Amino acid sequence: MSNRVIVIGGGAAGLMAAGQAAAAGAEVVLIEKMPRLGSKIAISGKGRCNLTNAGDISDFIKYYPGNGKFLYASLKQFDNQALIDFFESLGVKTKIERGSRVFPESDEAEAVINALQRFLSRHKVKVILGHTVKELLLTDGPKVTGVKFISTKNNSPEKQNDISQQEICSARAVIVATGGASYPGTGSTGDGYVWAEKTGHKVVRPLPALVPLRTSEQWPRELQGLTLKNVEVSIWVDGVKKDKQFGEMLFTHFGISGPVILTLSRIASHALAENKKVEVRINLKPALTPEQLDLRLLRDFSKFRNKQFKNSLDELLPRKIIPVIVSLSEIQSDKMANEINKKERKKLGALLQDLKLNVTATLGMATAIVTSGGVDIKKINPATMESRLVKGLFWAGEVIDIDGITGGYNLQAAFSTGYKAGRAAASAVADNN
Ligand SMILES: Cc1cc2nc3c(=O)[nH]c(=O)nc-3n(C[C@H](O)[C@H](O)[C@H](O)COP(=O)(O)OP(=O)(O)OC[C@H]3O[C@@H](n4cnc5c(N)ncnc54)[C@H](O)[C@@H]3O)c2cc1C
């Protein structure tokens, strides 16, 4: 009997799974719907690919707000150092940047894809590009027996159901590494979820995460392009504070983005899906107590006593945000600085430390960096990535209900689960011989 393993999807998880299964002795066929491998890796880290994080691996779990504990076994078997060593052995030198983020030394995501391609060729993985898997084939048991796939060019609704266009590839094990539903332009259109449901797995509602946010207020649009550094941003759901982050944020033509906002966006996405009220509050001066800020304002207003209020904040705030603050403060803009009374000053201080924005929506799946939700972990064995419902069916990468924050954690999860699934699938087909 054949020891063939089919891998569906040539992203980070699928490429790692295919190479590892082949390295462990399986005959591997990888089917990818796009005309090339690794489309999402190519755009990751702004084209530089933040492939993992060099932080302490024992801290990793907490950087996955979505089911981090499920990753314990895969991170243990194939951790960040193992990943760095793996790429170095394939000729990709790496470097560590701010926040312990690991990038290829060349700053080119393509170097990572090329290395994975070399890995696949070395172990003779058969790669079928430009073909879309349509169906998983099962026997009673239930047990996987292969897949049905067609050329992506023939992917129109009429041709999909045309039997003559479909090909069958049989195998003892199938690894589904089709990614989530975010950034569908790279090929991840949620196909794996359909097969999950058909095979009895639950799919936790996929929602966009690490995604910019829209606000009902118009003023962020006036500040388009402005980055605020060293601010503290908190997120509130139905009036309850859920989290806060310190760092950098950005105003855009639709609302807010930047590292701090992306990290908080998961909470916003989940709350909005439940029709809850979401508010973001910005503390522009988190290093100061309200009393210290008041003293600072007092000093500035005294120093600029002969200037109008609108011209008295230059040393306190970035120039671009001053008109917005002046307007929100409801203090007359042409009032002389030394005429601003205590009540007005206190109100201004409170505004600077609690600038509120109502979040109306996320920017959606089209631009989300990761999908929160996916195939429920309860029916996947974390030690092998095999389905607990269907023999020979393995899951790897973002298709599973796992998501991490930015910093290299999502690619590490895809590579580690891919590693585990690949090795386990190879050993499952070998055991069957
Ligand atoms: C803009 C952007 C930047 C990012 N930057 C980083 C970063 O720097 N660091 C980090 O850790 N994470 C980053 N991420 C997240 C990370 O890239 C993903 O979490 C990771 O690539 C997921 O890998 P995957 O293999 O599970 O899925 P994908 O990479 O989505 O791969 C799935 C593959 O399956 C194929 N496929 C889908 N359905 C079928 C089918 N029916 N038949 C055949 N093939 C199919 C798709 O075409 C695709 O190639 C970024 C994401 C985005 C969108």
Image: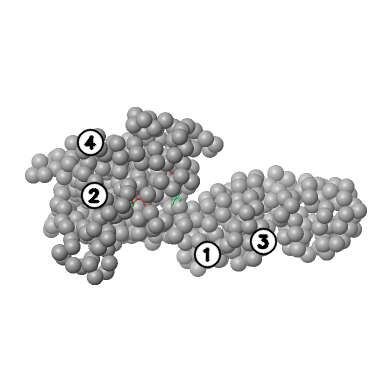
The residue lying at 18 percent from left, 51 percent from top is 391
Q: Nearer the viewer, residue 153 or 429?
A: 153
Q: Nearer the viewer, mark 1 or mark 2?
A: 2
Is residue 68 shown to the viewer in this render?
Answer: no
Q: Is residue 380 above or below residue 356?
A: above
The residue lying at 15 percent from left, 56 percent from top is 168
The residue labelled by disc 1 is 361
Q: Nearer the viewer, mark 3 or mark 2?
A: 2
Are the residues at dot 1 and dot 2 in contact (C-beta closer than 8 Å)? no
Is residue 48 shown to the viewer in this render?
Answer: yes
The image quadrant of residue 80 is top left
Task: Decide: few, some or many residues near mark 3? Use Cα within 10 Å; few <14, some 14-19, many ≥20.
Answer: some
Looking at the rendered structure, which numbered label has been put on residue 128?
A: 2
The residue labelled by disc 3 is 222
Task: Decide: few, some or many residues near mark 4? Use Cα within 10 Å; few <14, some 14-19, many ≥20.
Answer: some
Looking at the rendered structure, which numbered label has been put on residue 123?
A: 4
**Residue 176's spot in the image, x, y percent?**
27, 51
Label 4 SS:
loop
The disc labelled 3 sits on which kind of residue?
Glu
Q: Is residue 408 above or below residue 202?
A: above
* The C terminus: image quadrant: top left
The image quadrant of residue 371 is bottom left
Task: Decide: few, some or many residues near mark 2? Use Cα within 10 Å; few <14, some 14-19, many ≥20.
Answer: some
